[in-house]
Image (cartoon, helix red, strand yellow):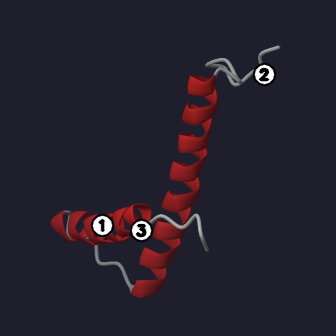
């Protein structure tokens, strides 16, 4: 994996820790499978948002998501 980003991997681990801390702060008791599901959903949502932002900044799509010609 030549394009693997160690920085992004550590960000993901930090996100996992933050989710657990925030859940404990609000007295929400999550078991391991719930944390895994939450992390998976978070990764998909974050990746989609980042992809859209990058396409928008590049000029490929409008803010509404329509392709530019």
In percent of the image, x 35 and y 78: which residue is there? 30
Work out whether residue 46 or residue 31 is closer to the camera in this orientation and state it: 46
In contact (CB < 8 Å): disc 2 and disc 3: no
Picture coordinates of residue 41 (x, y %)? Answer: 54, 62
| Residue occupied by mark 2 | 67
Residue 9: x and y in percent read: 42, 68
Mark 3 secondary-structure assignment = helix
Query: In the rendered image, which residue does mark 3 sit on?
Result: 6
> Of label 1 and label 3, which has the lower sequence position?
3
Q: How many other residues sit within 10 Å of disc 1, few (<14), some (14-19) or many (≥20)?
A: few
Residue at the spot x=26%, y=64% of the render?
18
Q: Residues within 10 Å of mark 3 (few under 14, many from 20)?
A: few
- Residue extending farthest to the left is 25
Task: Identify residue for label 1.
Answer: 14
Q: Nearer the viewer, residue 23 or 51?
A: 51
Asked whether, in this view, residue 4 is left or right of residue 23, the answer is: right
Residue at 28% from the left image edge and 71% from the top image edge: 17
Disc number for residue 34: none
Which residue is at the far front? 2
Upstream in sequence: badge 2 or badge 1? 1
Q: Position of residue 3 (x, y in %)?
A: 58, 64
Q: Which of the two labelled residues, at mark 2 and mark 3, occupies the earlier sequence position? A: 3
State the residue in front, 65 or 9: 9
SS at mark 1?
Answer: helix
As drawn, 58 above or below 49: above
Q: Please identify the residue farthest to the top as the structure is shown.
A: 69
């Amino acid at each position: 994996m030549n394009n693997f980003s160690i920085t992004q991997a550590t960000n993901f681990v930090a996100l996992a820790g933050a989710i657990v801390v925030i859940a404990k702060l609000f007295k929400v008791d999550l078991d391991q499978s719930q944390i895994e599901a939450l992390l998976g959903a978070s990764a998909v949502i974050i990746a989609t948002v980042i992809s859209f932002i990058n396409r928008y900044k590049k000029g490929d799509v409008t803010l509404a998501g329509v392709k530019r010609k």
